[in-house]
């Protein structure tokens, strides 16, 4: 591990996390940490718990009745599941982009600045600056700069997904969670999205769930392999894909099962 690697600060950390839907345990004693300026891919077969784990990182699972969690998840040392935690502020700091694009039926501009307006910013020039910067970071600015006041619903699927990333970035998150953001996109749109994601790690810590092994290998620095609710192996992406320690990991990344 080089010195630059060790200097990176841990943003988000999970320690001995267990998660249940009613009596069913879907996450089993998972410990993982995520550093600034890094992309971590969560991989594993369908139903292995990776999306549930991802959603636990900003308490999206709170919305599911009969769910419960134990263990610790900390954002810069603060327990996100404590009663003192402001969940709205947590979700600003730890943003999320879902599998299917979820633009609002508003203009492109109003989509991007939606959360910023909720935070009380009303100055038009400031809002425009935030919109431009966020759209540039999401690799969408050049495609939409001349039609910011058109409906976001007029955009292609790939553009809508990058718009949702811009909307998440506008409120200056420290961590960005992505749940299979390219699964509904064609290869060209996926390539643009991936380029944008790789650029984004300069600004935010990124955790991405993906079923696409090639995508995980292309864009991530670290990879975590989940199987039946357990974290089987976690480490540098190159090692996980080319010299994993666990036979099950080797079988999964080579396509032998899953």
Image (spheres, grey):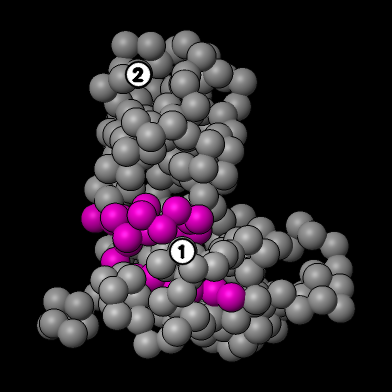
Can the viewer see residue 42 in this picture?
A: no
Q: Position of residue 134 (x, y in %)?
A: 34, 37
Quarter occupied by residue 33: bottom left
N-terminal-most mark, 1 or 2: 2
Compared to residue 111, the image places residue 251 above or below, namely below
Q: Is residue 204 magenta?
A: yes
Provide the residue designation for mark 2.
144
Q: Which residues are magenta?
A: 201-227
Quarter occupied by residue 240: bottom left
Quadrant of the snapshot with the N terminus:
bottom left
Residues packed near mark 2 inside 10 Å, few (<14), some (14 to 19) or many (20 plus): some
Can the viewer see residue 102 in this picture?
A: yes
Q: Position of residue 100 (x, y in %)?
A: 58, 38
Provide the residue designation for mark 1.
255
Quarter occupied by residue 67: bottom right
The residue lying toward the viewer, choosing from 95 and 2, is 2
Q: Position of residue 255 (x, y in %)?
A: 46, 64
- Please name the residue shown 65% across and 84% down the image: 28
Relative to 62, is 239 on the left or the right?
left
Circle 2 SS class: helix
């Amino acid at each position: 591990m080089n010195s630059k690697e060790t200097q990176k600060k841990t943003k988000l950390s999970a320690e001995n996390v267990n998660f249940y839907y009613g009596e069913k345990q879907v996450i089993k004693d998972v410990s993982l940490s995520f550093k600034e300026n890094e992309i971590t891919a969560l991989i594993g077969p369908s139903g292995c718990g990776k999306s549930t784990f991802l959603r636990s990182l900003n308490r999206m699972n709170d919305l599911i009745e009969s769910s419960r969690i134990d263990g610790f998840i900390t954002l810069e040392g603060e327990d996100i599941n404590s009663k003192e935690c402001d969940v709205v502020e947590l979700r600003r700091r730890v943003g999320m982009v879902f599998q299917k694009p979820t633009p609002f039926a508003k203009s492109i501009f109003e989509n991007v600045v939606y959360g910023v307006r909720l935070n009380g910013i009303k100055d038009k020039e400031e809002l425009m600056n935030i919109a431009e910067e966020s759209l540039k970071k999401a690799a969408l600015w050049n495609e939409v700069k001349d039609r910011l006041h058109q409906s976001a619903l007029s955009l292609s699927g790939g553009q809508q997904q990058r718009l949702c990333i811009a909307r998440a970035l506008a409120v200056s998150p420290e961590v960005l969670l992505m749940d299979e953001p390219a699964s509904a996109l064609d290869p060209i749109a996926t390539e643009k999205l991936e380029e944008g994601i790789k650029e984004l790690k300069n600004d935010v810590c990124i955790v991405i769930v993906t079923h696409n092994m090639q995508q995980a290998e292309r864009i991530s620095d670290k990879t975590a392999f989940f199987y039946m609710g357990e974290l089987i192996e976690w480490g540098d992406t190159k090692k996980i894909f080319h010299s994993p320690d666990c036979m099950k990991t080797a079988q999964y990344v080579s396509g032998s099962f899953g």
